[in-house]
Amino acid sequence: MSNHHPIIGLEIHIQLKTKSKMFCTCDNDIENKQANENICPICLGHPGVLPAINKKAVEWTVLTGLALNCVIPKETKFDRKNYFYPDLPKGYQISQYDMPIAVNGSLEINNHKIRIKRVHLEEDAAKNLHAEDKSYSLVDYNRGGTPLMEIVTEPDIISPEEAGSFLRELRLIMRYLGVSNADMEKGELRCDANVNIKLGNSKTPIVEIKNLNSFKMVERALAYEIERQIDEFAVLKKQKGKVTRGWDDRKGITREQRVKEEAHDYRYFAEPDLPPLRLKKIREAMQAKMPELPFEREKRLKEEYGLGPEDISALVNNKALGDYYEEVVSEAAAENSNQKVYKLAANWVVTELQKLLRLNKIGVSHLKITPENFAEFINIVSRGEINSSVAQIVLKEMFERGADPSQVITEKNLGQVSNTEELDVIINEVIKENPKPVEDFKSGNEKTLMFLVGQVMRKTGGKANPQVVQDLFRKKLI
Ligand code: ZN
Ligand code: MN
C-alpha cells in the first residue's frame, strides 16, 4: 500500500457492572431477565420523575480515567443529548458533552502511545427487537438507563492489528479494575471504528464503521475499509463529510448506511435535574484504591517469580488464573519458597490446569480445587513423592471432586513405591525376564538401563521412583 497511511480512531462503549442502573435503583443485572422486567418510572422517562447519580459509576469512570493516564478535571456535569428514537423513552439521553469525567490520557500498545481523548459517563438506550416476519418492532427497556462508559481515542492507531491489540488490552484493564467484564460478544464492550487514508496532503473522508461485535470483526472490517479507500483514493479524496458504513460479517464487506439528517445536531444542554460534581475527593479515593494493572503484574511475575514469557502472558491475560496462581504459590511457599516451586506451580497451573478447564469448559471461578490443596499438590510433586504421570491422575481427581491430594494418593494407592524390599522383588523379576538387555547393560550399554527402568515403571503402574530404581539396578548388576 506504498505511502498511503491509515488513520484509525476508536469509540468504545463499556457497560459498567454496578448493582443498580445509572440514574435509578433498578437492578443493573439484566442477563436472563424477562423483557421489561427491570424497569421503573425513572428509566422509562415518565413525566415528573427525578434521576439520581449512581456514585459507583462515577467512581469507576474516574478509576478508569486514572488507569488510562487521564487528567481528572475539578468538575464534571451531565448533559442532555436530544434525539428521538423508540429505544429512548425520554427523547434524550443523559450523557456528557463538554465536561467529561476524564481527558487527555494514553495507553501504550507495544511501545506505541495511543492518546485517549476523553472518558465520559452516560446511560444506555433500550433494545429494539425487530421480528423478521412481523410488521412491527418491540422494545425491551431492561437495558435502558444502565451505566455506559464511553472511551474515545485520538486517531493515533495505524493498523487493524494495533486496533485489535488496543481493544484486548483495554478489555484486560477493565477486568483488572473490576468495573466490567468487557465481553464484546455479550455487548459489554462495543466499538465503532473511524478510519480514513492519508497520502501526502490528501485524505479520504472519515468512515465510521458500525456493527462490530468481536475483535476479529474490528480487525477484518478495518482491513477491508483500508483497502477499499486506497483503491478508490482518487475519487474519495475529493469528497467531504463523515460517512457511516455498516460491517456485513457474512459477506466480509462494509456497506454505506442511510445518512441520518443533521446527525450531530443533538442540541446538547446541561441536565437541569442533576447537579455538577466536584471530583477532587473521588479522584483521591480512586488513586488510593488503584489495583495492580496488567503491565505491573507482568513486571512482577518476571521479577518476583522468575517466570518465562509464555507463563507470564497466560497468567496476565487471564486475571482469574493469575490470581489463582498467586494464591497457590503464596500457600506453597510457606513450605518451599524458591524459584523452582514458582516455576513448577506455573507449569501445572498454566499447562495442566488450563487444559482441564478448557476440556470441561469451565472458568477458574468454578474450579473445585482450593489454592491450599493445589499448593499441597505442588509440594508433593516438588518433593518427588509422585512422578509426573501419577501427578496427572491425582490432579484430574482433584479437579473432578475437589479432593485433597494426599487423600487421593492414599485412596487410589498412588503413593510411590520407594520401599526397597518391594522394589527388589519387581527388579529381580525384570532381570529374569530380560536376559539380553541385562547382558548388554553389564557390558557397558547405558541405554539399556532406561529400558529396564521402564519395565519396572510399567509393573508398578508408574509408581516407582525412577532414581531409586536406577540405583538398585546399578547395585545389583555392576
Ligand atoms: Zn429504573
Ligand atoms: Mn455514547
Image (cartoon, rainbow, N blue to C red):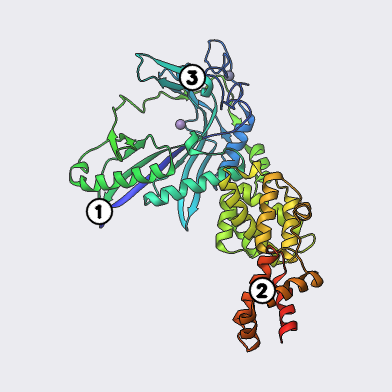
Which quarter of the rendered picture does the C terminus lie within? bottom right
Q: Is residue 342 visible?
A: yes
Instruction: For mark 2, give the secondary structure.
Output: helix
Q: Is residue 425 above or below residue 258?
A: below
Marks 1, 3: nearer the viewer: 3
- Classify mark 3 as within 8 Å of ligand 1 or not, answering yes or no: no
Residues 10 and 329: in front is 329
How far, Cα to Cα, is label 1 from label 3? 48 Å
| The disc label shown at residue 13, or none | none
Pinpoint residue 76: horizontal percent, then vertical percent.
56, 32
Q: Is residue 203 visible?
A: no
Residue wearing tag 1: 200
How many numbered tags mark residues here? Answer: 3
Ranked by sequence position, the earlier of labels 1 and 2 is: 1
The residue located at (56%, 10%) in the rendering is 48
Residue wearing tag 3: 140
**Residue 417 found in image quarter:** bottom right
Pinpoint residue 347: horizontal percent, then vertical percent.
62, 60
The residue type indicated by label 1 comes to Gly
